[in-house]
């Protein structure tokens, strides 16, 4: 983890292009803005080339796409690869809906994601590991998270961020964990979507995507934990508002002091 990346992000203010979902689009745009990057959302294929070109990173959220949108998603992913822009994919509910799993497999035949961010149910599904996903939520499973995240990273030759009570981040060889967090994240629909796009913001200011993914995960988790510490009880609405505030206020020094990030020993 390089906390200095947070200062760099804020000085560069990278443009992050998103194909988002209608459920969480506002939170995602505000999350990108609050951390110190510049969001732009797109729904039109005719602007894809120009918009990918002007962006520092591209995030494809597969939360609620139509058949028509798939052409745009496909083209944008392909352009991101061709123009060497970091490409982040959030494979929402890919463990719960077979159509989505097939769609993601088809998309990954067209373009290559540099980073995939999902919950345990989503990453287990991508890794072909048995798991009981539940809608957009992680659901239940017993497989070893370290094995899942490594298998997914190896299968797709990419960086995987698997979020949950502990976040697991792997490049297929190494695995890093982030233990900060608060259950309040789960009471706010779109916490994961926000993180996926914030990962894009970090990947927009470094060519080391493993580093970008780890730093984004720990910054986001520390900000959420700081908010939870200020609340007298579980207040999901207040949490959502204050999370935006804290993404803006959180400093590299606080993240360095409070971040519980560990590199696991691999055999
Ligand atoms: N049980 C938990 N306890 C604490 N923090 C959690 C827990 N589950 C997830 N988180 C944190 O919540 C954030 C979002 O991750 P999550 O796994 O919930 O994504 P998601 O399921 O895709 O969310 P969404 O679909 O609402 O966008 C991450 O920062 C993650 O670390
Ligand atoms: C609830 C929900 N449904 C489709 S996308 C979404 C937001 C979480 O990704
Ligand atoms: Mg999600």
Image (spheres, rainbow, N blue to C red):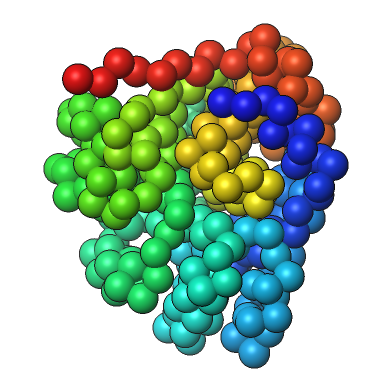
How far across and down, in percent of the image, does residue 151 sit? 22, 41
Q: In the image, 21: left or right of 113?
A: right
The image quadrant that residue 173 belongs to is top left
- Work out whether residue 104 or residue 11 is closer to the camera in this orientation and state it: 11
Q: Residue at the far top: name it.
A: 257
Above or below 242: residue 266: above
How far across and down, in percent of the image, does residue 116 sit? 42, 50
Q: In the image, 151: left or right of 230?
A: left
Q: In the image, 70: left or right of 20?
A: left
How far across and down, in percent of the image, does residue 204 sit? 65, 51
The residue at the point 55 percent across, 57 percent down is: 86
The residue at the point 46 percent across, 63 percent down is: 62
The residue at the point 60 percent across, 85 percent down is: 45
Screen quadrant of the C terminus: top left
The residue at the point 37 percent across, 55 percent down is: 93
Above or below 179: residue 47: below
How far across and down, in percent of the image, does residue 98 sit? 24, 64
Q: Please say whether residue 262 is visible from this viewpoint.
A: yes
Screen quadrant of the N terminus: top right
- Work out whether residue 49 or residue 38 is closer to the camera in this orientation and state it: 49
Q: In the image, 154: left or right of 240?
A: left
Q: How many marks?
A: 0
Q: Please say whether residue 66 is visible from this viewpoint.
A: no
């Amino acid at each position: 983890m390089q906390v200095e990346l947070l200062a760099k992000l804020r000085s560069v203010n990278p443009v992050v292009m998103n194909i988002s979902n209608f459920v969480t689009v506002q939170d995602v745009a505000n999350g990108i803005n609050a951390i110190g990057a510049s969001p732009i959302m797109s729904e039109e294929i005719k602007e894809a080339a120009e918009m990918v070109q002007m962006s520092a990173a591209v995030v494809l959220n597969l939360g609620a796409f139509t058949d028509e949108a798939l052409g745009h998603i496909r083209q944008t992913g392909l352009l991101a690869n061709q123009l060497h822009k970091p490409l982040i994919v959030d494979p929402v509910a890919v463990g719960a809906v077979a159509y989505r799993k097939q769609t993601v497999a088809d998309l990954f035949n067209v373009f290559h994601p540099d980073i995939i961010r999902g919950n345990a149910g989503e990453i287990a599904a991508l890794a072909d590991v048995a798991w009981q996903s539940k809608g957009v939520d992680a659901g239940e499973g017993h497989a070893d998270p370290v094995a899942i995240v490594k298998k997914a990273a190896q299968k797709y030759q990419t960086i995987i961020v698997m979020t949950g009570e502990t976040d697991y981040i792997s490049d297929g060889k190494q695995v890093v964990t982030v233990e900060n967090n608060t259950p309040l994240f789960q009471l706010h629909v779109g916490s994961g979507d926000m993180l996926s796009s914030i990962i894009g913001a970090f990947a927009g200011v470094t060519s080391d995507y493993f580093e970008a993914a780890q730093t984004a995960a720990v910054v986001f988790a520390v900000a959420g934990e700081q908010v939870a510490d200020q609340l007298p009880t579980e207040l999901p609405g207040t949490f959502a508002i204050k999370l935006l505030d804290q993404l803006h206020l959180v400093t590299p020094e606080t993240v360095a002091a409070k971040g519980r990030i560990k590199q696991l020993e691999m055999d």
